[in-house]
Image (cartoon, rainbow, N blue to C red):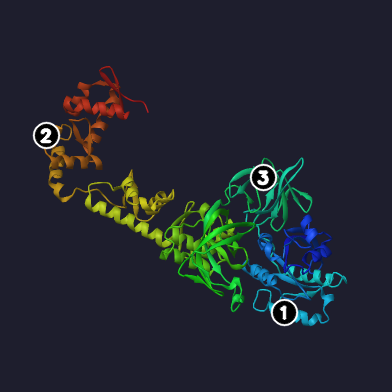
Amino acid sequence: MTTHPYILATAGHVDHGKSALVKALTGTDPDRLPEEKARGITIDLGFAHLELSIRDPEPTTYRLGVVDVPGHEDFIKNMVAGVGSIDVALLVVAADDGWMPQTEEHLQILSYLGVSHAVVALTKADLVQDVRAASEALRARLQGSAFAQVPIVPTSIVENRGLEELQTALLHVLQQTPPPRDIGKPRLPVDRVFVLRGIGTVVTGTLTGGVLRQGQAVVVQPRGQATRIRSLQSHNRDLEAAGPGMRTAVNLPDVEAGAGVRRGDVLTLPGIGGATDTLDVVLERSPRLLGLKVAAARPLKDGALVRLHLGSAESPARLAFIGADVLLPDQRIAAQARLEMPLQAFAGDRFIIRDWSEQATLAGGAVLDPEADRRSLHAVARKTFLEARMAQPDQADAFVRSQLLRDGVVARTRLLGPSRFSAGEVADSVSRIARDNRAVIFGELVAEAGWWESLRERAVAAIEAHQQQHPEQAGLPLADLRTGLQASLSVPGVFEGLVAGLCGSGFTQAGVAICRTGHRPALPPQLQAPGAKVRAALSAKPLDPPSRKELAPDGPTRQALRFLFQTGEAVELSEEVVMGAEAFATATEAICVFLKQRGRATTSELRQALDSSRRVVIPLLEHLDKAGVTRREGDLRALREP
């Protein structure tokens, strides 16, 4: 039998029977606080467990973590904390009251959070004579929303009516709901913290994005406190590991409740996104607010101080609009949320905006960039970047492409790390973009094709300019090339990748320099005559050349001689003695032949064999000693053994 975990959350107006319905379905009373019992209303989040099974088309069990949220307007922030990570909504509307203010607000919150799978329970059906009319009125209210076509099931707890039909409707919707995704980035938004005697601090939440395991090292964000998982439970069952879509309780040793962890924190793995106080976002307001004379429908202005609800967390935030002064119902814009309290956020996370007095839900939105910069907010590049992500908010390709266009080059490990896309999805996107010649991959780096080509063109221009200005040199020193491109080399490995790419397409690295393949150093025009003079002097008496002062008496001939050293045409034996490369090779070979025949020889014997002078032979032999060709034994020389 296949088992799938899902999260189901209630929604609806106060006193419409949400908690009673949960108790009837699960056998668990979600109202756990004494004040909730006394007042008869849900104040904080309540939790229960429900298992539903089906045999067609194959045996499947759905294990539902049920979150019961408060419906009273004073506790909307608690409601938002409970529905931030749900898969299916159970919208509850009392047949006798019908559609009420918090029904509408809860519906808009669910829509802003992207919840599209739901069942509507028409409760207290025993209190109305015409259930069909009540259902039709409810259906009319749902028009224009994501829930326009969801099942509506009349129920009555008093008469024990409709519960089986409600379970059947839930099963039907669950079959159409994609299972919670495992993207390898587990996050547990903490919605409850308590201490158990002998056990310690326990946090609970709805696990999303990946798996947590017993004994695993974890981090409490946004403070970055390191700890580990001592034990895991889900609905009072001990677990070795918990996966996405599970209500999860985690025992954290060495973490103090309140000071160390509290509601709104996120339990995650090290390296999976840190805290942020600036989010680039897309904001949207429901078209259902059009024409309403309520606080929620008032214009939302640039610079407004609001409360931003993300997951189970809430932070005061100042909104900075991009390209607009006001956001009206049925509008959508890019903006920046500047938080007073850092939060842990991913690109793709959805959130709710409520007014400062916490009386109205104003808007919803999604995070486009969780690592935003408050500078250059209205720059054209920023607007282009955000518009690309707004156009395809669920497409990894759009997010990868936009990041490459903005950053130019990115390490793979930094590409959409804090996002709702898995490493596999990001890698597939990079491969597709590279196949379309819009990105270049080298090693662990990915570069936007246009940016990379621009960098390459600048490098080529610098190399060719240097060759024109200094044809006598082997090429442009790599250190000089790096310095000239420094502004584009903020990511480690870019320069090495650039050089490797150049050397694979028409360029050659010559020692510590780089040049076009086939480049041969040549004397510049003004040094060609002095160079010819030096070459002629070295060739006239190859084994007994003139002294260095005679060979290069002035600046131009000295420059030409340095060029011959660099190109290997001449060999510097000492400060005073220079020999042509061919003559040096001839002398070396003659000495080796002589010593092979004799075994050992004096300087005088070697001088006579070369028909040269002591002025040349002594520095020549010392040079060969240093090079490991010969070795000195008193006044004798011998070949050094290999």
Quick one: label 3, few (<14), some, or many (20+) residues within 10 Å? few
Residue beneath label 3, please? 216
**Cα–Cα span, label 2 and label 1:** 106 Å
Q: Report the quarter where the C terminus lies.
A: top left
Q: Amino acid at mark 1?
A: Arg
Which is in the foreground here, disc 2 or disc 1?
1
Q: Secondary structure at mark 1?
A: helix
Q: Is residue 474 visible in this depiction of the protein?
A: yes
User: Is residue 260 left or right of 375 when viewed as pictured?
Assistant: right
Within 10 Å of disc 2 (Cα), the crowding (few <14, some 14-19, many 20+) is few
In this rendering, position of residue 447 left or right of residue 635: right
Q: What is the distance, in whole Å, between disc 3 and disc 1 at their CAs?
A: 48 Å
Identify residue for label 1.
139
Q: Position of residue 216 (x, y in %)?
A: 67, 45
* Percent position of residue 3, x then y: 77, 60
Amino acid, disc 2 = Glu
**Disc 2 designates what residue?**
550
Residue under the image location 69 percent in, 48 percent down: 213
Give the residue type that dot 3 points to.
Gln
Label 2 or label 3, whichever comes before in sequence order:
3
- Secondary structure under tag 3 reads loop
Quarter holding residue 43 = bottom right
Query: How would you rate the neighbour count of disc 1 (Cα within 10 Å): few for under 14, some for 14-19, many for 20 or more?
Result: some
Camera-side mark, 3 or 1: 1
Q: Are marks 3 and 1 in contact (CB under 8 Å)?
A: no
